[in-house]
Amino acid sequence: MGNSSVIPLNSSIQIFVDTGCSVLFGHKSIMAPIVALFPEALDCNNINIYPKITFVIGEVQYPITPNEYILKLSEKE
């Protein structure tokens, strides 16, 4: 799981970034390879085993760590 993967996308894809939202949406052809990097049930007690995801927009890299993309909630929430 700690290995890096490159998922090539068509360079003409247009995106919309909503920095006020914590959910990632996208067309199935884009999201399926990303979702395939993870098991069906995440082990939230050991999130450091999951990969860092880096989105490249233009030539700028935007890395996202497991601590940033896995939302940890207590049982009370």
Image (cartoon, grey):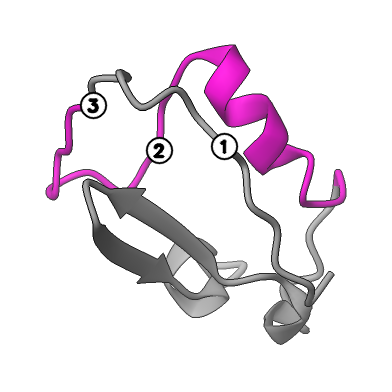
Q: In this view, does 5 lie above or below 1?
A: above
- Residue 77 in view (yes/no): no
Q: Which mark is residue 15?
A: 3
Question: Where is residue 43 shown, x and y percent of the image?
Answer: 81, 69
Question: Looking at numbered disc 1 in the image, what kind of residue is underneath it?
Answer: Pro
Does the segment drawn in magenta span residue 36?
yes
Could you tell me which secondary element the residue under label 3 belongs to?
A: loop
Q: Residue 8 carries which label?
A: 1
Q: Residue 24 carries which label?
A: 2
Q: Relative to residue 7, is residue 26 drawn left or right?
A: left
Q: Residues within 10 Å of mark 3 (few under 14, many from 20)?
A: few
Q: Which is the main secondary structure of the residues drawn in magenta?
A: loop
Question: Looking at numbered disc 2 in the image, what kind of residue is underneath it?
Answer: Leu
Q: Find out whether the residues at labels 3 and 1 contact each other: C-beta distance under 8 Å.
A: no
In front: label 2 or label 1: 1
Judging depth in this view, the residue of 33 and 42 nearest the camera is 33
Does the segment drawn in magenta span residue 4?
no
Question: Where is residue 66 shown, x and y percent of the image?
Answer: 56, 73
Judging depth in this view, the residue of 40 and 12 nearest the camera is 12
Instruction: Give, as a single range, the part of the protein colored magenta.
Output: 15-40
The picture quadrant where one finds residue 30 is top right
Residue drawn where x is 45% and y is 62% of the image: 54
- Residue 14 in view (yes/no): yes
